[in-house]
Image (spheres, rainbow, N blue to C red):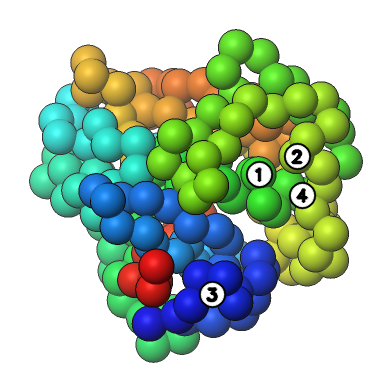
Amino acid sequence: MQEMTSIEIGTAMEGGYFGGIINVNGTHKGIIWAPKKEGQIKSIILPSGKIVEGAGSPNDCLANMKALIDAGSQAAKQISELSINGFTDWVIPSRDVLELGYRHLKPGHYKNYCSWRDGENSNSVPQGWLYTEDSPAQTTLDIFKDGSDEAFDLAWYWSSTVLPKGNTAFIQDFIYGSQDYHDLSAECRVRAVRLIQLDS
């Protein structure tokens, strides 16, 4: 296990890059973003009209993934079959894990949209609060800046967190930071992630 306080955002480790800490059912987990080349796809989650049950967690990626795979999601199946740098436990990030991707690794320099409750994250460690126009700022890590090898695209990304009706899921915009939801049949980016145990 790794000491939380000794890890800097963007550190190469555990098959990818460290991206912060999330609280999952009372346990602190380290977020590891997959290398972009091997761990990012562009996909729908499910065809129009399909319903997902049991994928409503804002922080538990594993529970959401199981529900998505059980519902027949090819995107979830594809991510679950990844083998990157010797690791095979990759998942689609939940809503609050994905939010930390933007908060810590924002690729561009645009002002944040900061409407409604964009940025609120009760499961991040420390807990995240609402974005302002200038916070979060563009990442200082060159490899994650727009146009670099590991940068998130200036586009919408899927989370694995499905809303109660079962046919829409939360998405995160990596241009302005907007958080929204969309029908599962929309095509968005998916960036694989894995969660690792950390010492408290």
Q: Cβ–Cβ below 8 Å for labels 2 and 1?
A: yes
SS under mark 2? loop
User: CA separation, marks 4 and 1?
Assistant: 10 Å
Q: Amino acid at mark 3?
A: Gly
How far apart, in angstroms, are the residues tagged by discs 1 and 3?
Answer: 18 Å
Residue 160 drawn at (x, y percent):
35, 41
* Secondary structure beneath label 1: helix
Q: For the residue marked with disc 1, what is the amino acid?
A: Arg
When asked about the image quadrant of residue 43, the answer is top left
Name which of mark 3 and mark 4 comes first in the sequence: 3
Q: Which residue was labeled with disc 1?
A: 103
Dot 2 or dot 1, earlier in sequence: 1
Point out which mark residue 16 bears.
3
Q: Nearer the viewer, residue 198 or 139?
A: 198
**Is any atom of residue 164 visible in this view?**
yes
Q: Nearer the viewer, residue 141 or 77?
A: 141
* C-alpha gap between disc 3 and disc 4: 17 Å
Q: Nearer the viewer, mark 2 or mark 3?
A: 2
